Amino acid sequence: MTTRESEPSTKETADPKNWTNRLRGWLEGLVPRGQALPDRQPVYVASWIYVFGVLTLTSLVVVIASGCVLSLGGTTWWHVSSLGHYVNSIHLWSVELFFGFMVVHLWGKFWMAAWRGKRALTWITGVVLFGVSIGTSFTGFLSQSNFSAQWIAGEGKDGINSTGVGAFFNVLNPGQMLTWHVVLLPLVVGVLTLMHIILVRRHGVVPPLDADLEG
Amino acid sequence: MSALSIVAAGPGKYVDWGVIQISVANLTIIGVMILLFILALVVPFPSHDEQGQRKGHRR
């Protein structure tokens, strides 16, 4: 959208008391101009270790897409359908890759102390995301609607109940676990992922410990 | 093979080192991840923009 030169910009005419203007200003300030989808990166980013974050994100996209397909047919159809077997396998293996890539991403960021340079919140959102992802995966195994899910629920109930959350997180209730798996926890993972990416774009990719930033 | 026969299949192979007990499958996955981590550090990243690198950026 273009504006005529004679027209004042919306920034100049914006009423600071208007919540829409304030929200727009907040959204515009989340990421520095041009950094939302940059096509250039510092030279130290040219390393395979910097690829694992986006590999994790790509796996997550496949996890969510295959999960959406699985949810179309109900809670058991993947046991009795060749297409269901296929999509179920895509869902499982994309989760395996998601965790594999995320762990290598975690190791890489840990050993380069990625919380440097005001990136503490980026690190913290990543750590929390890792924990919530494990919980989401756990509820997924409880939602398989097979003997494996029953066995995992039976083994896990005492541990979960000992934490005091059993009243509203009952692993023996497959319906409740399915809801946690397909609604609540993916929502948390999605919001945290968005926060994590915005923070990475806001503060930039962390340089290696020995990077000569003056040169 | 029926679903029941998969469930009734024998237990997986485990390795024991004192208090540490881990399935061969999980140990293999951990080994692959460590290998991937090392390879990510030592394998050179392909670059086709030498000029961009000299300026301190890559495209």
Image (cartoon, rainbow, N blue to C red):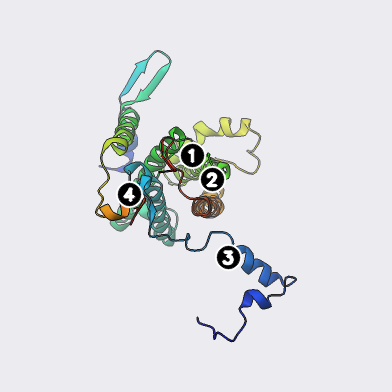
- Secondary structure type for disc 1: loop
Quarter of the picture containing the C terminus of chain A is top left
- Residue matched to label 1: A114
- Judging by the rendered image, the residue that carries numbered circle 2 is A122
Q: Position of residue B52 (x, y in %)?
A: 31, 55
Contact (Cβ within 8 Å) of mark 2 with mark 4: no
Q: Amino acid at mark 2?
A: Thr
Residue flagged by tag 1: what amino acid is it?
A: Ala
CB under 8 Å between discs 2 and 1? yes
Q: Position of residue B13 (x, y in %)?
A: 30, 25
The local secondary structure at tag 3 comes to helix
- Kindly tell me whether residue A92 is visible in this rendering: no
Q: Nearer the viewer, mark 4 or mark 3?
A: 3
Where does the image place residue A48, in percent across and percent down from the top left?
32, 43
Of badges 4 and 1, the one in the foreground is 1
Q: As rendered, which of A215 and A97 lies closer to the eye?
A: A215
Q: CA distance from mark 4 to mark 1?
A: 34 Å
The residue most toward the top is B18
Q: Give the crowd class for mark 1: few <14, some 14-19, many >=20 residues within 10 Å.
A: many
Indicate which disc, 4 or 1, sits on the residue closer to the N terminus: 4
Most foreground residue, A125 or B21: A125
Chain of the residue under label 3:
A
Marks 2 and 4 sit apart, C-alpha to C-alpha, by 32 Å
Numbered badge on residue A28: 3
Disc on the earlier residue, 2 or 3 = 3
Q: Is residue A87 above or below residue A168?
A: below
Distance from the alpha carbon under mark 2 to that under mark 3: 19 Å
Instruction: Give the alpha-carbon distance from disc 3 to disc 1, as whole Å.
Output: 25 Å
The alpha-carbon separation of the residues under discs 4 and 3 comes to 40 Å
Q: Check if mark 2 and mark 1 are on a common chain.
A: yes
- Which chain is indicated by disc 1? A
* Numbered label attached to residue A89: 4
